[in-house]
Amino acid sequence: MTSLANITHRIARSQGDPQLIRSGPSSLSSSDKLARALGWFSIGLGLAEIVAPERFTRALGMRGNETVVRACGIREIASGILSLSIEKQAGLWSRVAGDGLDLVTLMSGLREDNPKRDNVAIAMTMVLGVTVLDLVGAQATSARHARNRGQRRLYYDRSGFPKGLAAARGAAKNFPAPKEVRARPVLASAAS
């Protein structure tokens, strides 16, 4: 059975391009996969906070803070999109900073007159757990994708020729000679 990769390979490639024989393991590391999972989690949580902020505030005994919950939702979605992008380090570190803001916001719900203080404590514990995941992901992703300043990228093993360097040698001999070579007229400069 022909795999989807082979089908798309035939559609997207020219005849002279190398052919895909088989696909190997994913190039995503565990830190990249964690960043992807946290990005989707962040988008989902952000959507829930935007769509139903009153459910969050009611469960935490913090009614009247719906605008704050919606703002947190927008921040979550932005962090999630960044975590799914090429700039995943920025997305994960923004998630860590957002977790700190969430903890500060939740601390206001620990007041004595809040009958749902226990729910706030549970929510803070959950945020702390996610913060640990965010920290681990941010540190691992930053270490994996770190670039040293001054260190040049080396491309000595790449030729840039799809059929290889040997096939490219002498390839210009196969082109027909032009029938007429036209030289551009040289204009005398006005300063002469």
Image: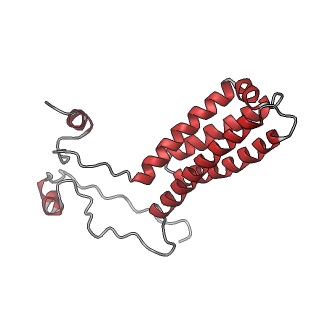
Residue 90 against residue 68 in the figure, above or below: below
Asked where in the image residue 66 lies, by quadrant, the reply is top right
Residue at 51% x, 66% y is 189
Q: Residue furthest right?
A: 113
Residue at 46% x, 61% y is 145
Location of the N terminus by quadrant is top left
Residue at 20% x, 33% y is 3
Q: How is the image coloured?
A: secondary structure
Residue 119 against residue 155 in the figure, above or below: above
The percent coordinates of residue 105 (x first, y second) are 77, 43
The percent coordinates of residue 26 (x first, y second) are 31, 48
Most foreground residue, 85 or 30: 30
Q: Is residue 93 left or right of residue 32?
A: right
Residue at 61% x, 44% y is 79
Most foreground residue, 46 or 149: 46
How many marks can you see? 0
The percent coordinates of residue 155 (x first, y second) are 32, 67
Q: Is residue 155 left or right of residue 168?
A: right
Q: Residue furthest bottom?
A: 150
Q: Is residue 178 left or right of residue 12?
A: left
Q: Is residue 172 left or right of residue 108?
A: left
Most foreground residue, 120 or 87: 120
Asked where in the image residue 56 lies, by quadrant, the reply is top right
